Image (cartoon, rainbow, N blue to C red):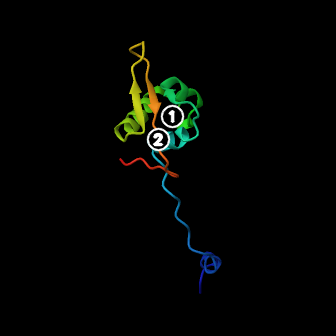
Amino acid sequence: MASLFERLDKGRPPPTKKAPEPSPAQKLLDWLQHWTKPTVSAREICIYGPNSLRDRKSTIDSAEILVKNGWLVPIKTRRHDMHKWQVVRRPIVHPNVTT
């Protein structure tokens, strides 16, 4: 005799798999597609960017990945502890970061 749970589970569809969480660099790239200014600083990303990138270290790490992939170009700043990048715009609908 089947248990109650086996009988309830009989007509249920199989569980669906969740899509994997995008990397912080991918989240930053997706957010940069909506950023209207030609440049972005680490401070602006920490204030206006995705919630997962609100601390300075993860912001700079994600931006460096985008620099390696050609989505950001570093800009010389007047302060040594300031980070600023020029956003490279490409005509791609859903850009991906290759890691």
* Residue that label 1 marks: 53
Above or below for 17 versus 81: below
Instruction: Check the picture and name the quadrant holding the N terminus.
Output: bottom right
Number of marks = 2
Tell me, for residue 69, which label it has, or none. Answer: none
Q: Position of residue 49 (x, y in %)?
A: 56, 34
Secondary-structure class at tag 2: helix
Residue at x 54% of width, y 41% of height: 33
**Is disc 2 in contact with disc 1, using a CB cutoff of under 8 Å?**
yes
Which residue occupies the foreground of this view, 38 or 69? Answer: 38
Which residue occupies the foreground of this view, 99 or 57? Answer: 99
- Amino acid at the residue labelled 1: Leu
- Amino acid at the residue labelled 2: Pro
Label 1 Cα crowd, 10 Å radius (few <14 / some 14-19 / many 20+): many
Q: Position of residue 62 (x, y in %)?
A: 42, 36
Residue reaching furthest bottom? 1
Q: Position of residue 77 (x, y in %)?
A: 42, 17
* Residue that label 2 marks: 24
Residue at x 40% of width, y 31% of height: 73
- The alpha-carbon separation of the residues under discs 2 and 1 comes to 7 Å
Secondary-structure class at tag 1: helix
